[in-house]
Amino acid sequence: MGMFDTYIPKPDLPCPVCGASHLEWQSRDGPRALFVWEQGRPAPAGQRVVDESVVSPKARAEIRLPERFEIYATCACPTFLNAVGFTEDGVWTRTELLSAANAVAYHHESEREFRKRLAALAEHLGHSSESRD
Ligand SMILES: [Zn+2]
């Protein structure tokens, strides 16, 4: 459908820069059908569309997320945030901010580009932990 889905991490994943909570997390790594995914629930909690393209509750109950997916949010502070969701047995169980430790290369990324991005991620985390204290 070329859309995205909305993601609700539980517990909430606040902005690491300003602490704002309940950000609007979205992703194109899942089914991309305006589903609302809630961490801890195997199937989408809902779908944000009006009538015709709504998937039946029965079909919706069968839909699962991939093992690893990236979600993003834009905080008003303003910061663009990336996080990684992980599923176990089809259930979204864990969410972490994207870091050098959990990043994987994108399909379009060369080895060199990926290493460059890892270095930037490591540096970025260093800065944010410094400014927090
Ligand atoms: Zn913020």
Image (spheres, rainbow, N blue to C red):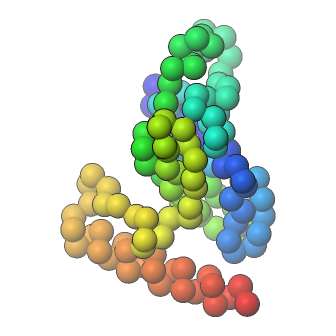
Q: Furthest residue to the front?
A: 89
Is residue 74 positioned above or below 46 on the image?
below
In the shown orientation, is residue 68 left or right of residue 129? left
Quarter of the figure with residue 78: bottom right
Measured along the vertical axis of the image, is residue 64 above or below residue 10? above
Q: Is 6 left, or right, of 67 in this rendering?
A: right
Is 94 situated above or below 57? below
Q: Residue at x 56, y 43 (%)?
A: 92
Residue 29 in view here? no
The one of 111 and 37 positioned closer to us in this rendering: 37
Q: Position of residue 72 (x, y in %)?
A: 56, 54
Determine the residue positioned at 56% across, 19% down: 60
Give coordinates of residue 56: x percent, y percent: 59, 10
Task: Please state, as top left, top right, bottom left or bottom right, where the C terminus lies in the image.
Answer: bottom right
Is any part of residue 96 visible from this angle? yes
Name the spot of residue 106 as percent of width and height, x first: 32, 56
Residue at x-position 37% and y-position 72%: 117
